[in-house]
Amino acid sequence: MRRLLSAVTAMSILSAQSVLAQPQCASLTDQSAFEVQALRSELMVLATGCHEDDRYNAFIHRYQSDLQANERAIDAYFKHRFGASGRAEHDRFVTELANAMSRQGSELGGDFCPRNGMMFSEVLALSSPADLPSYAAGKDLVPASVTICAPPSTARSKTRATEVKGDTPKSGRKAVTAN
């Protein structure tokens, strides 16, 4: 009975997560790009933790051009949002996402591989690469601890406002903005 109650509780929590999940990006295109990135990261964690290298390689091979286009979209997002520090912010995001997903996998322990391993079969069974974004969106994989599409920090916004006005920072050099 206790096991049944635990299973029902877990199912309730899991089903509520997708209902409670809200898009975090103003643009659906940006939201989709981040969701596909989260799917790729989840499958990478699965491949590493569950010895599914062959299935991960099959995923990468099948969706290579779409994943490359998605990577370019994410890169463009960070360059647009953070200017010259866009590459560093992009790298920070990818690392933060992978670490959060790895922690979630560790928390599931021995249930992680059986519970999430079916994702390889599902994603490889999609009828076309065009189905990848909707599949990723349906999985709600972006961990709550990872912020996507967040505005730059307040300190960065203040610095940016100073740069836009053309004021001279404390260094004595004229600030240059990257748009």
Image (tube, rainbow, N blue to C red):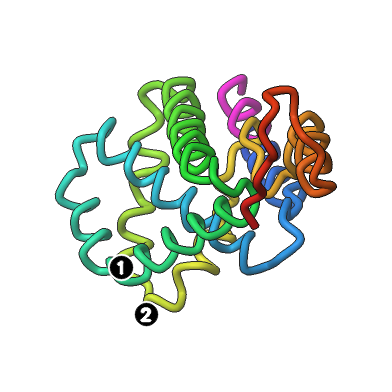
Residue 29 appears at what percent x and percent y?
Answer: 62, 68
Within-10-Å neighbours for mark 1: few <14, some 14–19, many 20+: some
Name the chief secondary structure element in magenta: helix
Residue 152 vertical position relative to residue 177 in the rendered view, above or below: above
Residue at 48% x, 20% y: name it. Answer: 107
Q: Which residue was labeled with disc 1?
A: 63
Instruction: Say left or right for 135 vs 119.
Output: right
Q: In the rendered structure, does residue 73 fall within the stretch colored magenta?
A: no
Question: Magenta stretch?
Answer: 1-9
Is residue 4 a member of the stretch shown in magenta?
yes
Task: Classify residue 27 as left or right of residue 120.
Answer: right
Percent position (x, y) of residue 91?
A: 44, 38
Residue at horizontal 45 percent and vertical 68 percent from the top: 132
Q: Label for residue 128? A: 2
Q: What is the secondary structure assignment of the residue under circle 1? A: loop
| Towards the viewer: 102 or 69 | 69
Task: Determine which quarter of the picture holds residue 139.
Answer: bottom right
Q: Amino acid at mark 2?
A: Ser
Residue 47 in percent (x, y) is at 26, 40
